[in-house]
Amino acid sequence: MSKVVETVKQVVKPILAKHSFYLFDVAFVKEKGGWYLRVYIDKDGGVTIDDCVLVSDELGEKLDEMEPDPIPQAYFLEVSSPGAERPLRNDEELRQAVGEYVNLSLYKNLNGNKSFEGTLKSVTEDQVVLENDQWGKHPTVAIPRDLIAKARLAIKF
């Protein structure tokens, strides 16, 4: 992990705690000839644009006050939500998503499919169970954990 990312995490966590937000991720990347510091925040019920502006203002002020400057090159600070279809990157995030509508991509076919969407009903060490009332006679499917390539929240249409 880069020193910039680690420093920003340490600076932003007290700001987020003060406002009952939590940190989803921090990225410091070079794109299109410029550096971007991206801070992804969330809270119960989701974040608003005003929440992002609040954190951006407070974080920018704290970073500007630091000596020596933790980010000596010019950069763009972006504070945002991780998104409605954010990835579920680890066991903790997957367990927190129980009851949510999710999309799972698999390494290989299961029952003729490599992708499933439904309400996440349970998560164990060995499997996850999804339910979707549009699946007809068999509205639930148990998916072995070792088949899951990617998991993310999904929007139900």
Image (cartoon, rainbow, N blue to C red):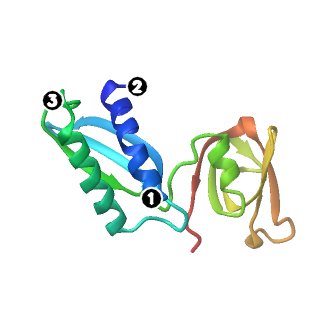
Residue 70 coordinates in the image, percent (x, y): 23, 30
Residue at disc 1, secondary structure: loop
Farthest right residue in view: 137
Write the residue at 55% across / 64% down: 44
Residue 107 visible: no
The residues bearing labels 1 and 3 have C-alpha atoms spaced at a distance of 29 Å
Q: Residue at x 82, y 61 (%)?
A: 140
- Up/down of 61 relative to 154, above or below: above
Quadrant occupied by the N terminus: top left
Which residue carries the number 1 mark? 83
Identify the residue position indicated by label 2 in the image.
Answer: 1
* Element carrying mark 2: loop
Q: Nearer the viewer, mark 1 or mark 3?
A: 3
Residue occupying the point 66% across, 56% down: 97
User: Is mark 2 in CB contact (under 8 Å) with mark 3?
Assistant: no
- The image's mark for residue 72 is 3
